[in-house]
Image: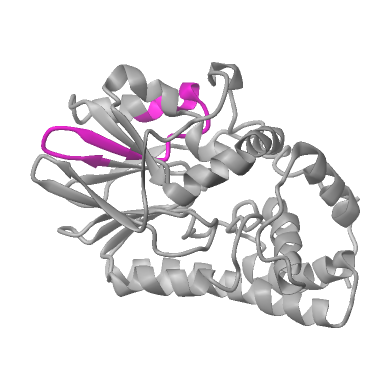
């Protein structure tokens, strides 16, 4: 079993600025990416623009808007929240001056905001100092959807159909993907990552692989993961789905086996880190995510079906117990 010096809490050591790219995925879809930081998807329709995931603060969303304005002057009428995490939703206020009319989320995501939105906001701001740059630009309170749906709904941007699909539990209980059926293009949120470690602190490990199978069944030709580059071409999309599936299954297999022996959580964590680091250790935010991922997975493996709420205090206590 390996030992090492205590690691810096969460992403506090991640302070280097990332290079931003704004690339076209298909006729109407664009990808805002930044070397493993959270992505934003953009759909430019006939009469309006839809944005999926807003960035962490209005100040950071302003750069997304600047990139959009380089290619279109159409109003940004729709914001879609693929899930409830603060790093994805707190930038929504920046779009109000651009024509925003609706903030859309699954009903399950709204329920999670009610249940744990305030705690998640404080938790994530504490974990990601760089991503919450200019956090004072976030207005008081939470980002609330103005429109919710269950399972599936369509938004029409002129003649362009954009489907919102809730394919099943995975990264959270309320994950939504944005699907352009005419272009077989998907904005997947954090259900899929590429060369980046899935955060699974609020996940459903036993459900997640099946949810990924449901995405694959749509046969996407282009896919924007929650982190990592846009994946264009059927083979690249398959690689992204398979890599995320393998990680989730490997964490589950290791944690379940170790937990079955009655080992304490710290030992389960160390065994899992030793097993997974050779394959996944180079992925973005691996050291940040793994304590949260193993803790949640251990809960699920030992009978806690619904993820416990993360608070800033619980984050620190967990980190100290596993890494201190």
x, y percentage for residue 61? Answer: 43, 27
Q: Position of residue 169 (x, y in %)?
A: 50, 63
Vertical side of 162 occupied by 141: above or below = above
**Which residue is depicted at the point 36% across and 68% down?**
215
Task: Name the residue nearer the viewer: 172 or 241.
Answer: 172
Give the colour scheme of this rendering. Answer: one colour
Measuring from the top left, give residue 132's x and y in whole percent: 59, 29
Q: Can residue 212 be seen at all in this image of the molecule?
A: yes
Where residue 211 sits, quadrant-wise, is bottom left
Residue 240, given in percent of the width and then of the height, sits at 43, 66
Answer whether residue 128 is magenta in the image.
no
Q: Is residue 43 left or right of residue 203?
A: left
Residue 250, relative to residue 225: is it above or below?
below
At a point 72% along the width and 55% down the height, the residue shown is 292
Vertical position of residue 134 compared to residue 165: above or below: above
* Image quarter in which the N terminus is found: bottom right
Of 152 and 8, which appears nearest the observer? 152
Confirm whether residue 85 shows in the render.
no
The mark tally for this picture is 0
Q: Is residue 250 left or right of residue 239?
A: right
Find residue 281 and report its image quarter: bottom right
Residue extent of the magenta highlight: 43-64
Residue located 48% across and 26% down the image: 60
Toward the left, the furthest residue is 159
Depth order, front residue of 111/64: 111
């Amino acid at each position: 079993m390996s030992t090492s010096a205590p690691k810096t809490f969460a992403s506090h050591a991640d302070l280097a600025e990332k290079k931003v790219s704004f690339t076209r995925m298909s006729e109407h879809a664009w990808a805002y990416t930044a070397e493993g930081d959270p992505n934003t998807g953009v759909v430019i329709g006939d009469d309006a623009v839809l944005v999926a995931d807003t960035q962490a603060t209005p100040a950071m969303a302003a750069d997304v808007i600047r990139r959009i304005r380089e290619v279109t002057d159409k109003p940004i009428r729709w914001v879609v929240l693929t899930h409830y995490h603060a790093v994805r939703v707190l930038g929504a206020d920046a779009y109000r001056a651009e024509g925003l009319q609706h903030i859309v989320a699954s009903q399950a995501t709204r329920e999670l905001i009610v249940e744990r939105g305030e705690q998640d906001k404080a938790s994530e701001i504490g974990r990601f100092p760089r991503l919450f740059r200019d956090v004072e630009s976030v207005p008081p309170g939470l980002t609330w959807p103005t429109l919710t749906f269950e399972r599936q709904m369509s938004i029409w941007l002129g003649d362009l159909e954009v489907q919102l699909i809730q394919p099943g539990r995975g990264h959270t209980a309320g994950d939504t993907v944005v699907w352009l059926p005419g272009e077989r293009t998907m904005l997947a949120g954090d259900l899929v990552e590429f060369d980046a470690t899935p955060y699974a602190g609020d996940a459903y490990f036993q459900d997640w692989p099946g949810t990924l199978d449901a995405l694959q069944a749509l046969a996407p030709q282009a896919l924007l993961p929650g982190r990592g580059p846009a994946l264009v071409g059927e083979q690249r999309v398959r690689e992204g789905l398979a890599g995320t599936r393998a990680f989730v299954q490997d964490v589950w297999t290791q944690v379940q086996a170790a937990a079955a022996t009655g080992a304490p959580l710290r030992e389960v964590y160390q065994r899992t880190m030793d097993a997974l680091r050779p394959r996944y250790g180079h992925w973005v935010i691996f050291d940040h995510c793994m304590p949260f991922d193993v803790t949640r997975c251990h809960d699920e493996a030992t009978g806690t079906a619904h993820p416990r709420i993360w608070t800033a205090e619980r984050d620190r206590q967990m980190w100290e117990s596993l890494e201190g």
